[in-house]
Amino acid sequence: MPNYAYTVRDATGQVMQGTSEAENETILRRRLSEQGFDVSEIKQTKARAKSAASGLGRVKLNDLAIFCRQFSTMIDAGVSLVRCLEVLGEQTTNPKLKRIIADIQSEVEAGQTLSRALQKYPNVFNSLFIGLIRAGEVGGVLEESLQRLSQFLESDQKLRRKVKSAMTYPTIIAVVAVAIVLLLVTFILPKFMTLFKDLGVDEFPAPTQILMGFSNFLLQQWYYMLAFVILFVIAFRIFIRTRVGTRIYDRIKLQAPVFGKLNHKVALARFSRTLGTLLESGVPILQALETVAGAVANQIIGDAILEARARIREGDKIGEPLQKSKIFPPMVVQMISIGEESGSLDPMLSKIADFYEAEVDAALESLTAAIEPVMIICLGGAVGFIVISMFLPLVAVVNKLTEAGGG
């Protein structure tokens, strides 16, 4: 979790400074405002090196899911916490996770709580992970929290895998299409042009001239295109890291043609699954909503969740502010309202998550089925244009030879 330095004024006008961890700047600003402070400035501080485990690769969701499931099984069997960590450290094959577990084991042996020890590694254990562990410690049901956490991680990994696998085939087709076009334009076309000039062709049809210009640009000025692509990528990454850029990019992801609805459904599934898991584990709703706001990975939806949190803090129900945001569909709002009124919000959120995960599956199947013929048509059109452009001068040469033979 990022660390921020902030400057605020209290009710008497006194300036105060401090540091705090938060999912993002918006969440911290809202939290300080709820505490009665007037926020003057918030800046993210550079992350401090947490341990020697940094730089040893990354910890995958699958590694964490296995870690939680095995941890839960041993805790449920009555194995002590320190012994569990020792066994898990020996068993894991991920070198980074192995070093982290060893450090956490040392912290726990020194008297530190498990959740507090996990907070040293925010890049591995996010606020959702830590929140569930803390709830399990407080309620004396750590094995249940770990079990829910492993189920959540497995569901999240399954959802990510489906999206990734659905995009793999179109990506492969796009790469192959670009490679074929580049091969034709930079290797085959120049040989044909040399042949035509040897045959005395001085004037070329318009399609051939366009293709020749593109080929010459790629062969002689390719570095301009490469520089443009690199600068664009750098500028784009810098832009989306700014507060305004993040909001614009997140809004585009929700409103983009074709992919916007898919991103929206994925975010709703993650919102429902995360909130349901937190509430089922006994995390207070205000804390759960703050965690979910950062977990949905979209600032537009996160702001709507934080607005709902602020309204709940003032005594309102969760459904009304979600409805006013116009981001959450009526069905989601109604099911959440019914669950809140009946005291069964946790299972209702699970049903919503199941529904939208099924919707994501259907959307991915439809998207894959629609993208394939479109990309094949585009590839066929590009190759057809290149072939026609290369053979038009040849037709002109044949006509000249025919006329000469007839004369």
Image (spheres, grey):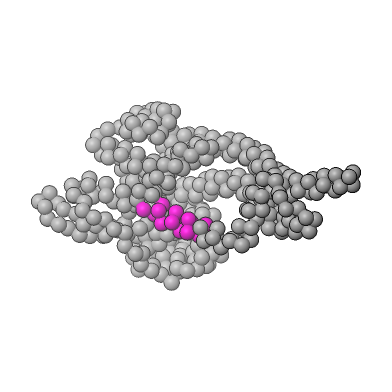
Q: Quadrant of residue 91?
A: bottom right
Q: Residue at x 36, y 53 (%)?
A: 242
Instruction: Determine whether, in the image, residue 179 is placed left or right of residue 148.
Output: right
Q: Residue at x 30, y 39 (%)?
A: 307
Name the one closer to the observer, 280 or 242. Answer: 242
| Residue 279 seen from this side | no
Q: Tell me, yes or no, whether the highlighted magenta stretch contains residue 401.
A: no
Name the one closer to the observer, 286 or 199. Answer: 199
Residue 75 % position (x, y): 46, 55
The quadrant in which the C terminus is found is top right
> Number of callouts in the render?
0
Residue occupying the far front of the picture: 407
Residue occupying the far right of the picture: 406
> In the image, which residues are magenta?
229-242
Residue occupying the far bottom of the picture: 52
Residue 140 % position (x, y): 37, 51
Name the one closer to the observer, 47 or 141. Answer: 47
Q: Residue at x 42, y 68 (%)?
A: 103
Residue 379 % position (x, y): 68, 45
Q: Tell me, yes or no, whether the highlighted magenta stretch contains residue 240.
A: yes
**Which SS does the magenta portion mostly show?**
helix
Query: In this rendering, is residue 395 above or below 115?
Result: above
Residue 14 % position (x, y): 12, 55
The quadrant in which the N terminus is found is bottom left
Instruction: Determine whether, in the image, residue 359 is placed left or right of residue 254.
Output: right
Instruction: Determine whether, in the image, residue 389 is placed left or right of residue 348.
Output: right
| Residue 90 seen from this side | yes
Q: Residue at x 49, y 64 (%)?
A: 97
Name the one closer to the observer, 301 or 238. Answer: 238
